[in-house]
Image (cartoon, rainbow, N blue to C red):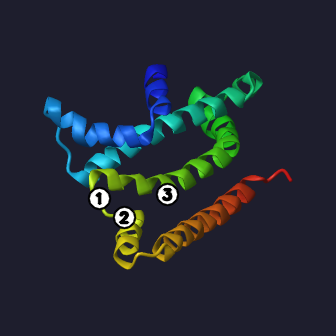
Amino acid sequence: LEGYVWLFRGTPLLLQLIFVFYGLPLIGIVFPRFNAALFAFILNYAAYFAEIYRGGFGAVEEGQFEAATVLNMTRWQSLRYVVIPQVLKIVLPSMGNEVINLVKDSSLVYVIGLGDLLRAGEVATARDVTLVPLALVGVVYLVMTLVLTFLQRRVEKSFSYYK
């Protein structure tokens, strides 16, 4: 698992997209454009989420497990009722940031020929010889991240039950 996380966190997502779509067919693994993008994004973001959750579980003190054992909880019960709620509270901000990054990183799919917001902006910019379409694309991304940030804060607030 450490090697997987190291590989996918240590190489750019753009390179991973190119490798999945253009490199894997060299060894007989062919994906349609959308599936290639989806596969690369899943591999990349799973590595980040694995590291986020590893840190979250590491932040929960061993005493929490011991307390659950004293209360005669099974391992599953201690995870479900004691540990995982604490881990979720710890990892929520990082998970929200990664979701926002995912929205912005979706613009990278243009390198394998998939249409996206950025590609549409580039086509309009080339056609109209103005930067206004790209500015509008920026505004759309800002609105999307604003909505996601608002939702992230609402979820985090619902988990701050001790304040």
Crowd class of label 2 (few under 14; some 14 to 19; many from 20; radius 10 Å): some
Residue closest to the eye, 85 or 107: 107
How many numbered marks are there?
Answer: 3
Crowd class of label 1 (few under 14; some 14 to 19; many from 20; radius 10 Å): few
Relative to 86, 132 lies left or right: left
Residue 27, above or below 110: above
- Residue 103 is marked as 3
Q: Could you tell me which residue is drawn at 61 percent across and 50 percent down?
A: 97
Name the kind of residue labelled 1 in the image.
Answer: Leu
In this view, the residue farthest toward the bottom is 128
Disc with the residue nearer the chain's start (1 vs 3): 3
Q: Could you tell me which residue is drawn at 17 percent across and 37 percent down?
A: 25
Task: Look at the numbered discs 2 and 1 and tell me whether their residues touch, using CB distance below 8 Å.
Answer: yes
Relative to 68, 9 lies left or right: left
Crowd class of label 3 (few under 14; some 14 to 19; many from 20; radius 10 Å): few
Name the kind of residue labelled 2 in the image.
Answer: Arg
Label 2, on which residue? 119
Q: Secondary structure at mark 1?
A: loop
Q: Pick the quarter of the image with the N terminus.
A: top left
Q: Quadrant of residue 63?
A: top right
Disc with the residue nearer the chain's start (2 vs 3): 3
Q: Could you tell me which residue is drawn at 48 percent across and 28 percent down?
A: 5
Label 1, on which residue? 114
| Mark 2 and mark 1: Cα distance apart in space | 8 Å
Residue 21, above or below 141: above
List x then y, in percent, for residue 33.
Answer: 24, 52
